[in-house]
Image (tube, rainbow, N blue to C red):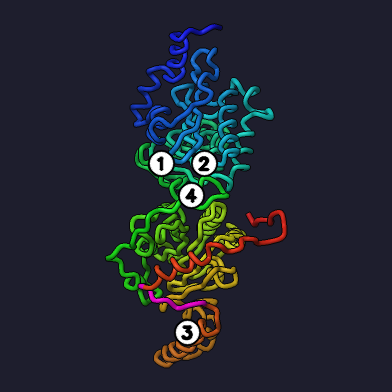
Amino acid sequence: MTLDGAALEQLRKRARSGGADKYHAANAGKGKLFARERVALLVDEGSFVEDGLYANALAEGLPADGVVTGTATIDGRPVCLMANDSTVKAGSWGARTVEKIIRIIERAYSTGVPMVYLVDSAGARITDQVDLFPGRRGAGKIFWNQVRASGAIPQVCALFGPSAAGGAYIPAFCDVVAMVDGNASMYLGSDRMVEMVTGEKTTLEAMGGARVHCAESGVGHFLCRTEADALDVVKNYLSYLPSNWQQQPPAAPAVAAPEKVDLAALVPVSERQAFDMRRYVKGLLDDGSFLEIQALWAKELTIGFGRLDGVVVGVVGNNSMFKGGVLFVDSADKAARFVQLCDAFNVPLLFLSDVPGFMVGSAVEKQGIIRHGAKMITAISEATVPKICVVVRKAYGAGLYAMAGPGFEPDATIALPTAKIAVMGAEAAVNAVYANKIAAIADETERAAFVAAKRAEYERDIDVVRLASELVIDAIVEPHELRADLVRRFTAARSKDRHFSRRRHGVTPV
């Protein structure tokens, strides 16, 4: 076929216009943007270079084969990206769709730049399954490439509509997923398939909607009100990470901490009184720099990126506002994955401990709390980035280990004057050791005096000054001194040797 300029321009226009007008109108009615509009909003103006525009150009009704792929810059930094076009057969995958996605991930990996996935797809076209599903360059190769790229380059997904069946694994293999509330969903089987196979009657929203995955399953990381919000999350997230594992996170101009936050006043004296670790984190970091991740899931643990004097850090903090800050199965998983993310991309880790320990009881034992706790402790053991443990109020039991306590080679273990480190709290310890004796004291006043004396004795045993004198902790720091102390310590640890073990890889207790 010989093309003149006019014919080529017509071919380009048809490929770039996507599906029929009725599908554009239907998406607009749901508050959804066209795939190419999403790309334009995300990347720097004029920076997008598209490949594969003419995929399936000889077929009827398959412009670009339903996916936009190419390179661009975001805030001046190169990225690779793909964007499903849901106006073309609901963004479903054909053979060329798959090949385009494979190629762009391979390019991101080979050039060492972040890979961005703008997902809105009904999954594979069943009618094309022989061409797209089983072969060496079939859909499985997408996931193989994602796994190979994991930890080598940042991978971030914004989910605007469905991510169905096998396609649901594209978000799952990304570092983080931003989901648009009301439109985004992930599921392995549709509601009709679920009813056919299991008899359960459900809906896509109830089974795999954005709120379900951001608040219950943990597969989603950011619940976004609009598509523009989701695209902003992608930009913001990438601003904290290097382009690849061999680089350092980008520095930013230093910003002071919020002036009106009194860190000492935020921490109640009584262990029974909860406080919001998120407020503490925001008061410690550069003002406005904290990006919380998975804010709606496993809320007893707060994680996210921030900056100290312009330098990126990853924060892991126990939040007593939720479940007393006790570590559960989900919060252990949440911490393990975030620690691995930071370690992969050279982000120093700050642990803020106020942890009673791991949850106990038959329910969590059946859920595998030991296995999940071991996963968290494995991730912290293997992390070789600079890591500092700050005991804000308490670190009891295996919670001390899970928060990078002294045995896990932190670059420092710092205690605030309010800190306590022990196998368990005083009340639990006295009850455990003296339960029979306490029960045998008939007089209520005498019993209370006995318990108070034993608690005081236990408190003296775990006194923070004693722990410092025994070199269990490296320093006792006043709250108003903590930020400056951390800045100096992270600066000193920047050049540390990051070798961990003589092996290929460990066997993770997944």
Front in this rendered view, residue 317 or 10: 10
Q: Is residue 355 visible?
A: no
In magenta, the rendered stretch is 474-480
- Disc number for residue 13: none
Of marks 1 and 2, which one's residue comes earlier in the chain?
1
Q: What residue type is labelled 4?
A: Leu
Q: Which type of secondary structure does the marked residue at label 2 adopt?
A: loop
Please identify, in this view, whether the residue under mark 4 or under mark 1 is nearer the observer.
Answer: 1
Q: Distance between the residues labelled 3 and 1?
A: 48 Å
Label 4 sits on residue: 241
Q: Residue 4: x percent and y percent?
A: 48, 7
Label 1 sits on residue: 75
- Disc number for residue 114: 2
Q: In this view, does 470 lie above or below 355?
A: below
Asked whether the beta carbons under mark 3 and mark 4 sit within 8 Å of each other, the answer is no
Asked whether the beta carbons under mark 1 and mark 2 sit within 8 Å of each other, the answer is no
Q: Residue at (40%, 30%) from the top-left corner?
A: 46
Q: Quadrant of the N terminus?
A: top right
Please identify, in this view, whether the residue under mark 1 or under mark 2 is nearer the observer.
Answer: 1
Q: Which amino acid does label 2 sit on?
A: Pro
Please identify, in this view, whether the residue under mark 3 or under mark 4 is nearer the observer.
Answer: 4
